[in-house]
Amino acid sequence: MNIEIKRSIKPVNYLDAIKFLEDRVTKIIKNQADELIWILEHPSTFTAGSSFNKSDILDKSINIIKTSRGGKITWHGPGQLICYLVINLNKRKRDIRKLINVIEESIINSIKLYGIDTFSDRKNIGIWSKLKNEDKKIGAIGIKVRRWIAYHGFSININNDLSNYKKIIPCGIKDKGITTLKKINNKNYNKLSELIIKNLITNLRI
């Protein structure tokens, strides 16, 4: 199975990225394109998934982009690693939960190489780290499926400004915090995307 690896150096507008993903889904349905793993960064952007609540918006002055992915409200921006996927589950097991598990495992195993233990949570989907007996979120996952083509993806907080999350209730979760990898362990994470891609490609043989 051929998977195109795409990297964008400059920040990519959120709506432009989603249009690219949706066009790729259409092409894959028509057997006109390969699957995709795309590493990028967004300018500061608030997005709302299909199950968001208006009460999750604390700062009513911010602009919210409604999107087709699953999940609620989150923020994307500089210092955050974005990984978008377009994966054809028709060529694998038609199992969305299995795909989520693959994404979670790929992220957890990659971050572990930096000496940071993280975990997934069935109730609150994402990647978490326990700090001083408090669960802190470092990664968000949101997937949509069309004709068994899965797309959208996940984000990982590396060195981003956490103050933006004070304007919303991130992912609708009120009782848990958010942090970055740099705050946990001040290392160089330039190779993290390469590790994640390697693990994803291995684990996507499902």
Image (tube, rainbow, N blue to C red):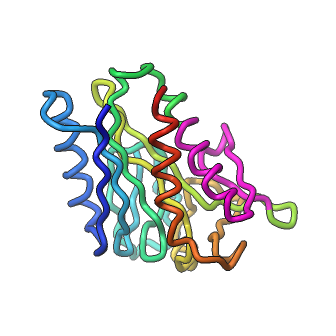
- Magenta span has 190? no
Residue at (31, 62) in percent of width and height:
7
Of the pair 17 and 8, the residue shown nearer to us: 8
* 141, 32: nearer the viewer: 32
Residue 51 in sight here: no
**From the viewer's perspective, is residue 179 above or below residue 30?**
below
Please say whether residue 109 is one of the residues in the magenta stretch: yes
Callout count: 0
The quadrant the N terminus occupies is top left
Residue drawn at x 46%, y 56% is: 54
Residue 148 seen in the figure = yes
* Residue placed most toward the observer, 160 or 31: 31
Where in the figure is residue 103, as x and y percent of width and height?
A: 53, 42
In this view, 88 is above or below 51: above
> Does residue 115 lie above or below 10 as drawn?
above
Above or below for 46 versus 83: below
Q: Quadrant of residue 139?
A: bottom right
- The magenta-colored residue range is 101-130
- The one of 125 and 151 positioned closer to us in this rendering: 151
Image location of residue 31, percent across then percent down: 16, 28
Image coordinates for residue 12, horizontal then vertical, percent: 27, 68
Residue drawn 37% across the image and 51% down it: 84
Q: Left or right: 20 with respect to 37?
A: left
